[in-house]
Image: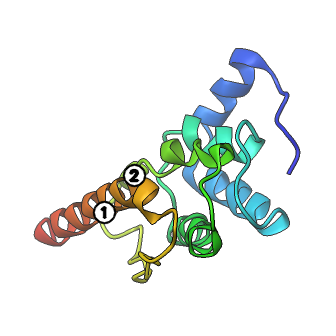
Amino acid sequence: MRRYRGGGSAGKLLMENLPDPVFNEIALQHLKQNPGFIEEKSFLYLLLCQGEQPWGRALAQLVLTGFQQWLSGARAYYWNLWHYKRILVPPPLPRRAGTAGKLPRLSWDTRSPVWHRWEKDVEWLLRVLAFRKEMQEAMK
């Protein structure tokens, strides 16, 4: 994936203010065209971390599945994936309850040699998502 070299405050302002459907479609297209892990400082990384838009179900699924597959196959901890700790921060809630859909349950390979490095981050993400789901169900 190409590194994003675009510019400054104008680029950041544009990313922050993309409408939710446009944000999700752009991110999905980048993930489909550039499968695998998301490089630090790439356009997609900046888009996911700078935007305040909620992730749609398909986007969340692709991001988490890609990371899960890497984690399952990793045999050593690589510092080049440290930036995923920022990506794994739970995305904002959708503006309307029920718009995100349910994420399929992912099975995490806890036997992976690098699981202990990511366990707390993954568990935190899953706890927040479960709490949000309970809140949305309670508000129905």
- Please report the residue visible at 37 percent of the width from the left and 60 percent of the height from the top: 119
Colouring method of the image: rainbow
Residue 13 left/right relative to 1: left
- Please report the residue visible at 49 percent of the width from the left and 45 percent of the height from the top: 85
Residue labelled with disc 2: 90
Q: Determine the CA span between mark 1 and mark 2.
A: 7 Å
Residue 129: give x, y in percent of width and height: 31, 63
Locate residue 37: give its quadrant. bottom right
Q: Earlier in the sequence, mark 1 or mark 2?
A: 2
Q: Please, which residue is most extreme toward the top here?
A: 9
Residue 121 left/right relative to 13: left
Q: Judge by depth and name the residue closer to the eye, 8 or 87.
A: 87
Residue labelled with disc 1: 129
- Please report the residue visible at 73 percent of the width from the left and 36 percent of the height from the top: 41
Mark 1 crowdedness (10 Å alpha carbons): few <14, some 14-19, many ≥20:
some
Amino acid at pointer 1:
Leu
Q: How many marks?
A: 2
Give the secondary structure at mark 2: loop
Contact check, label 1 and label 2, Cβ < 8 Å: yes
Q: Quadrant of the C terminus?
A: bottom left
- Please report the residue visible at 20 percent of the width from the left and 62 percent of the height from the top: 131
Amino acid at pointer 2:
Pro
Residue 78: give x, y in percent of width and height: 65, 50
